[in-house]
Amino acid sequence: MKILGISAYYHDSAACLIDGGKIVAAAQEERFTRKKHDAAFPAHAVRYCLAEAAARDGAAHGMARPDAVVFYDKPVLKFHRILETYLSVAPRGIASYLQAIPLWLRDKLWVVPNIQKSLAACAIDEPPEVYFSEHHEAHAASAFYPSPYRQAAVVTLDGVGEWATATIGVGEGNQLRLIEEIRFPHSLGLLYSAFTYFTGFRVNSGEYKLMGLAPYGEPVYKQRILDHLLDLKADGSFRLDMRYFDYLSGLVMTSERFAELFDGPPRRPESPITRREMDLARSIQEVTEEIVLRIARHARQLTGKRHLCLAGGVALNCVANGKLLRSGIFDDIWIQPAAGDAGGALGAALALWHNGMDKPRQADERRDSMRGAYLGPEFSDAMIQHFLDQEGLAYTHLGEERWAEEVARLIDEQNVIGLCHGRMEFGPRALGNRSIVGDPRSSKMQSLVNLKIKYRESFRPFAPSCLEERIGDFFNLDRPSPYMLLVAQVRPERCTPPAGNERDLGLHEWVNRPRSDVPAITHVDYSARIQSVSRETNPRYHALIEAFERRTGYAILINTSFNVRGEPIVCTPEEAFRCFMRTEMDYLVLGSFLLKKTEQPNWQETENWQETFKLD
């Protein structure tokens, strides 16, 4: 039985298809429309999923017909919350109200007709029945059902669904139930987003920047946050003092009272980052970690389970995840790689299959069922070669026996390389198939890739891709981290002691000061956001890192997503080539083909990508 899951209309719209409970395909709409965090109905992603399912069934062309479709939340219930919120603050909020209501009346309340229209475009004229999941039920299902655990506590944390902003649940076998919740407007996700906005970053996009900025600061505002912004209980529940926030009635996140509390108005986007922003980032990060730990302790006491599953946008805070793992509250944790709204499409489908239809579930306590999150489109060598020849591009074909050794050699020679091969990743992280890679031993690589390739802030750290079997050689981590969702410390014997004057330096100078023998992936607090690479889930990427280890003794690479600032991660070979040519990358790998920048025809940019892609 094929079930199509859909998430849409807030941010990171996506579609997913499962067949007999197994994940066949999943992708975010942004990868097709090239609009980052695209919230529109995921028509392109739906078509991809149905085509992938048809191909898996052996059909040369066409679309598979889903037996059921499930949407990741209940729009009428969410609309009720929005109306009730506006009524509670009226007449304030009229500008926000006038923006939001037409969108709901035009699109967001009409989910079933939009699904039917999308399926009709795929030549499916008799649409199946449409079901609806609650938002946090979808998050919880996306966390528990693909996890390796037979039983687990489940915690979801985000901005807001219908009414819930956080839930605690329990999964046992094929059944999942939610047992406690925190309700809007009291939201950890919205609290973190308020500081994202106040420090000059884009809400629902720049939260990871705030997390990356935190180690540069000191928690000087932490107690001020705890004393004034929220009433935090021992079990992790809390209430926000809404006098400091403006997201109920306004078009911004924080009020003038918030600015008075934190020493002045919000930072203007793209203006210099000051000590205040660094300290605010560190302070809210530590508050977030404290809330997560309290909720986790309560979840352990409430459920009695040894394992924890996490989803919701806050679960992408890999620093908090790492601290939670090290706390020992649970024996182990598993985080859905598409933890945000995109993963809701997957969770909704799995919830219908297991909870709704009482279908059995298999879990081996070892590996999850996400297939490495490699669930998106793949392009054959024949398709890639057709594109290369059609465009008159210069390339070298690398047989599989040469591929890893040749790419590893180029990385060892300090080249920066774009990788576009295999199935595209589902979720916000590039995991080796749509990645830019480089040598982690270079003290200049982080600044080079940030400023000349990604065109983004120099302070932002890069993640390491490390062979799963070598994690303990580099990091204080004793288990896999396949989805880049855990932060751990670089092993002390690899680190260079701090000089002591780091906090007197500018961001650019500080970030370029070597801190270990793998400086390009070592953050200023000697931490790293780790991706472990398994031979089982990605043999080709694993072989590349193995080849680099044979040359250098280092089983590790820099890995950052294949895109420029504000652009969604590339999907197709054409998009990868455009991104390659508009940056200072040295080589591009498309499937089995290697392209050298200096050998390509003169590149004429047909659009100003810095205007096309809205800065995040």
Image: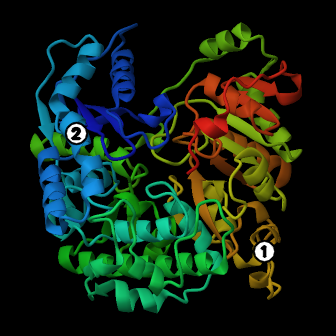
The residue drawn where x is 61% and y is 70% is 213
Q: Quadrant of the N terminus?
A: top left
Residue nearer the viewer, 283 or 480: 283
Q: Secondary structure at mark 1?
A: loop
Whole-percent x and y of residue 607? Answer: 66, 27
Q: Is residue 598 visible?
A: yes
What kind of residue is marked 1? Gly
What kind of residue is marked 2? Lys
In the rendered structure, find residue 240 and report the number of the disc placed on it.
Answer: none
Whole-percent x and y of residue 425? Answer: 50, 39
Quarter occupied by residue 152 = bottom left
As drawn, 146 above or below 182: above
- Which residue in the protein does label 1 denote? 506
The residue drawn where x is 38% and y is 74% is 255
Q: Secondary structure at mark 2?
A: helix
- Which residue in the protein does label 2 denote? 108
Mark 2 and 1 residues: CB-CB less than 8 Å, in contact?
Answer: no
Q: Is 440 situated left or right of 328 in this image?
A: right
Q: Earlier in the sequence, mark 2 or mark 1?
A: 2
Q: Give the color scheme: rainbow, by chain, secondary structure or one colour.
A: rainbow
Residue nearer the viewer, 57 or 569: 569
The residue drawn where x is 62% and y is 12% is 382
